[in-house]
Amino acid sequence: MNNLIRSTVRCLRLSSSVYPPKQVDGQHASLVSSARLMCSAALQKDLGEMVKKDKVVVFIKGTPAQPMCGFSNAVVQILRMHGVNEYTAYNVLDDQDLRQGVKDFSNWPTIPQIFLNGEFVGGCDIFLQMHQDGDLVEELQKLGIRSALLDAEKESK
């Protein structure tokens, strides 16, 4: 029972998923299952709010100042190249429930994940392709963000 209480408190405090303890007697199994479902739903609701927190939201390994994988670093560098400095970044290495939760939320198996105006764009590969094709400039303009690459292009002419 103490494991159930600790799991439920953790869920409510951190808005994260609850996993049942390894040993659960039959009497408490349905309570654990119910708590897990409630917390999973809460995390999905929270993720829905998190991706709308800013025009650009990324879930990465590490932080923008210190990305912890090459793909996360690539996303941060692409944003810098476009002069996008105001965005929300979540470090999935800090919270394994968030890491799995965002994958479930977007139905995308890898990190990093990029959201523009609350809409899932994709991972590093798609974001890089959008950058290379010039589509990212257009998508940023739709959000009211002027890409620094447009200014760099004018200066080089």
Image (cartoon, rainbow, N blue to C red):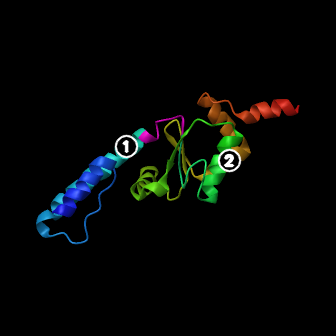
17 with respect to 27 (left or right): right
Q: Which residue sits at x=18%, y=62%?
A: 2
Q: Is residue 38 something that shows in the picture? A: yes
**Residue neighbourhood size for the residue with mark 1, other residues' Cα within 10 Å, grouped as few (<14), some (14–19), many (≥20):** some
36 with respect to 56 (left or right): left
Q: Which residue is mark 2?
A: 77
Choose between 126 and 17: the one closer to the eye.
Answer: 17
Q: Is residue 125 something that shows in the picture? A: no
Spatial distance from mark 2 to mark 1, Cα to Cα?
27 Å
Residue 54 covered by magenta stretch: yes
User: Element under label 1?
Assistant: helix
Q: Which residue sits at x=31%, y=52%?
A: 40
Q: Which residue sits at x=37%, y=43%?
A: 46
Residue 97 x/y as whole percent: 39, 56
Residue 146 x/y as whole percent: 67, 30
Q: Which residue is mark 1?
A: 46
Residue 85 x/y as whole percent: 62, 37
Q: Quadrant of residue 94?
A: bottom left
Amino acid type, callout 2: Gln
Q: Which residue sits at x=23%, y=54%?
A: 8
Furthest toward the front, the residue is 65
Amino acid type, callout 1: Asp
Q: Which SS type dominates the magenta stretch? A: loop
Choose between 82 and 138: the one closer to the eye.
Answer: 82
Residue 30 x/y as whole percent: 16, 61
Choose between 116 and 87: the one closer to the eye.
Answer: 87
**Residue neighbourhood size for the residue with mark 2, other residues' Cα within 10 Å, grouped as few (<14), some (14–19), many (≥20):** some
Furthest toward the left, the residue is 27
> What span is in magenta?
50-56
